[in-house]
Image (spheres, rainbow, N blue to C red):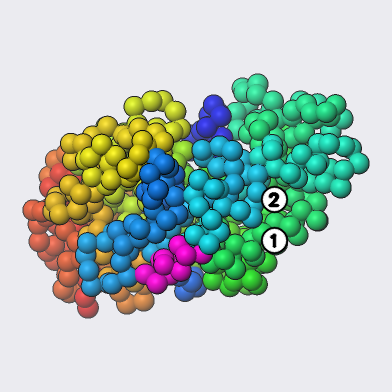
Amino acid sequence: MRASRLHASVLVVALSGWACGSGSGGGSPETPGKTPDTQPPPSEIAPAAGDEWYRKAVFYEVFVRSFQDSNGDGKGDLQGLISRLDYLNDGDPNTTQDLGVDALWLMPIFESPSYHGYDVVDYERVEPDYGTEQDFEQLCAEAHKRGMRVILDFVINHSGVDHPWFVDSASSRTSAKRDWYVWRDQDPGWKQPWDPFNNTPSWHLRNGAYYYGVFWEGMPDLNLQNAELRAEVKRLASLWLSRGADGFRLDAARYLIETGAGGGQADTPETHAFWKEFAAYVRQVKPDAVLAGENWTTTPLIAPYYGSTKDVPGGDELPLNFNFPLSEQILASLNGGNAAPIAAKLAEMAAVYPAGISDAPFLTNHDMVRVATQLGGNGGKLANAAALLLTLPGAPFLYYGEELGLANGAANNDEAKRTPMPWDGSAGGGFTTGTPWYGFAPGYTSGRNVATETDAPGSQLSRYRALIHARHASEALSRGGLKLFTSTKGVSSTLAFVRTLGDERVLVVHNLTDSSVTAGPFAVAGTTPEVLFADSNVGTLSSTASGWQVTLPARATGIWRLKP
């Protein structure tokens, strides 16, 4: 869930201004704004510490309601998802027709009265529209057979207003569950914390008292300072792990425990303490389970959610945290034809993130206008976006349909960001034999669908498959560190870096402009380049006295392993 879904403002992230690299933001003499070769040594991001599966996984976010309908009611369900697993990963590393992802993130599947599921009314049951608990266990078993993991959206900042816990809590001041939520006799007057000019209240009247619900009155915040509730949340986590889940995506993680108005409504020490406690419990129950935190804020405020790396490699709090600021800068760089904003964000991450952590980069998610729409449907920019996401450090997250270039639906609402998956160009899109719960995004009948793209060499789907395959072929790309060559200031036409792990070095160069660019030289050890991925007409990577150099066509990417 994001604050801006409820008309809040998204924070604009300031660039760090760090200067780094060799000034090779496209080493072409004609590149405007080229920075002279007088920069400090490159900034470096350390390789991921630890060898847990998720540190090198490619994740795929699924809105079950929109993925595949199995019974003709127009709503996607778990059996439908099971029927499409081979599209995502067929379990055979020698085939190339599957997408090749390693893990699925399921948006909320617990019982809820809303289409989106973020107002849970029963944490133990699967939403009947989606199936049963047995269907979920079958999904996990089938995914595991194919080498995929499954993580669940775990919404514990708040419940739905119709959850029996809240009904009981609101019924009486002496209710046994009164303290499971946050109540006051008088309205404290706090507003939503993400926008100082917002007059939307956070406290809501019910039965003569006020309860705290930071998002809206239909989602009362749980009081995780209550020991009984904390124990119940842990029990529920253990239950779903025992049913086959491999971890959780943690919704609204920074708003968990509030201590006062404004700054006391987010990122509190009490929130961090709870996540450390919860993470330790999950590691005890299932040591390789992952926790991925939704902390939509600035880079310096995301960094502490990894916790301490002293005793737990990669951090003792949340081992993955979604990188919203990097997403913002990727989109800005692609639309501006300038790699410097991405370079600056990577440099800031190198400066403030704990060494050895695993990032969670992504382009867009279910709360954002889809990347294809934000990039105006431009094929070159979309090609850049895929290549950037799948060459950066961390565990990348794809949003279903991004691999097709799926755009937003026609309306200006959240449903338009979550439209049904177009499997073919038929009336039901291959998604349903009935009437879809919501209309398809434009373009699915004219080629923007799986059936059309699957065998088309130049399609977005083919590109994602090839890039994921290249990532899996290299441990350095999968979980290695990064040394940045591109300047963080001025105008840089290329984003260039080397990914390293042990003795393996992989040079990556992206041209983010609509013109051909000669990039380099890049001083990276190695004598023989092995192509892991290269777009059409990318030149030969050649060795010069000063380093490696290459010419790339517009919006092209080259990836080379440099052998000793």
Q: State if disc 2 and disc 1 touch (CB < 8 Å).
A: no
Answer whether residue 536 is visible to the viewer in this image: yes
x and y percent of residue 384 in the render?
A: 25, 47
**Quadrant where the image shows the N terminus:** top right
Residue 271 marker: 2
Q: Is residue 555 left or right of residue 122?
A: left
From the viewer's perspective, tell me whether residue 172 is left or right of residue 44.
right
As measured in the structure, the alpha-carbon distance from the residue carrying label 1 to the one carrying label 2 is: 15 Å
The verdict on residue 255 being magenta is no
Name the residue located 52 percent from the left edge and 32 percent from the top edge: 5
Question: Which three-letter amino acid code belongs to the residue tagged 1?
Answer: Lys
Residue drawn at (69%, 25%), measured in percent from left and top? 201
Quadrant in the rendering for residue 558: bottom left
Query: Which residue is depicted at the point 46% across and 69% down?
Result: 141
Please provide percent x and percent y for residue 251: 58, 47
Give the SS element for disc 1.
helix
Residue in the image at 41% along x and 41% along y: 73
Q: Is residue 131 left or right of residue 469?
A: right
Report x, y in % for residue 531.
17, 66
x%, y% of residue 410? 34, 27
The residue segment tinted magenta is: 137-149
Label 2 amino acid? Thr
Residue assigned mark 1: 234
Q: Who comes first in sequence, dot 1 or dot 2?
A: 1
Secondary structure under the numbered disc 2 in the rendered image: helix
* Disc assigned to residue 523: none
Q: Is residue 183 above or below residue 460?
A: above
Which residue lies most toward the right here? 174
Bin the neighbour count of mark 1 within 10 Å (Cα to Cα): few under 14, some 14-19, many 20 and up.
Answer: some
Q: Nearer the viewer, residue 384 or 89?
A: 89
Q: Is residue 541 above or below residue 203?
A: below
